[in-house]
Amino acid sequence: MRDTSSSHQRISVVEVMGRYCGDLTLAAAIAGGCEFHHGCLKWNIPVTIWWQKSKPVSRKGKNTLSVAITEHMCDVDELASYIEKETGRETRATVLGHIQRGGSRFLYDRILASRMGRLCD
């Protein structure tokens, strides 16, 4: 998604599963290189308040931004519309749902897990 957002110079708002727990959102934000995430402090906060707190990040001259949101935190379509209106930049909302639930591990994942396990010895 980052590559597509970057090539189209758009902002991506991604809803990550996890119900009312922000752990998965934080992990996804770190792994995906999100500029910011919102995952576990307040539920159903108004979009305007959320974006005002996040606004300084959008001014750093980047051509794309990625935002990870824990599910049920807010309406991601409403947030995307609001961000687009505020910034004048195309903004898309994506709800990953169960599509993010793993699958086969890549070779690199297995090697990294083995190395980390070895460090614990």
Image (cartoon, helix red, strand yellow):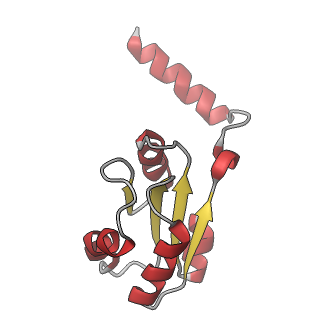
Q: Which residue is pictured at 68% across the width and 36% down the height?
A: 106
112, above or below 49, in the image: above
Q: Which residue is pictured at 57% across the width and 70% down the height?
A: 93
Q: Which residue is pictured at 54% across the width and 24% down the height?
A: 113
Residue 67: x and y in percent read 45, 64
Looking at the picture, tell me which residue is in the foreground, 62 or 66.
66
Image-quadrant location for residue 95: bottom right
23, above or below 15, in the image: above
111, above or below 57, in the image: above
User: Is 43 displayed left or right of 69 in the figure?
Assistant: left
Residue 118: x and y in percent read 46, 14
User: Is 28 displayed left or right of 99 in the figure?
Assistant: left
- Location of the N terminus (image quadrant): bottom right
Count of marks overlaid on the render: 0
Q: Which residue is pictured at 53% across the width and 29% down the height?
A: 112
Residue 80: x and y in percent read 50, 75
From this viewpoint, which residue is outermost toward the right?
A: 104
- Location of the C terminus (image quadrant): top left
Residue 17: x and y in percent read 56, 47
Looking at the picture, tell me which residue is in the foreground, 25 or 117.
25
User: Is 5 displayed left or right of 84 in the figure?
Assistant: right
From this viewpoint, which residue is outermost toward the top?
A: 121
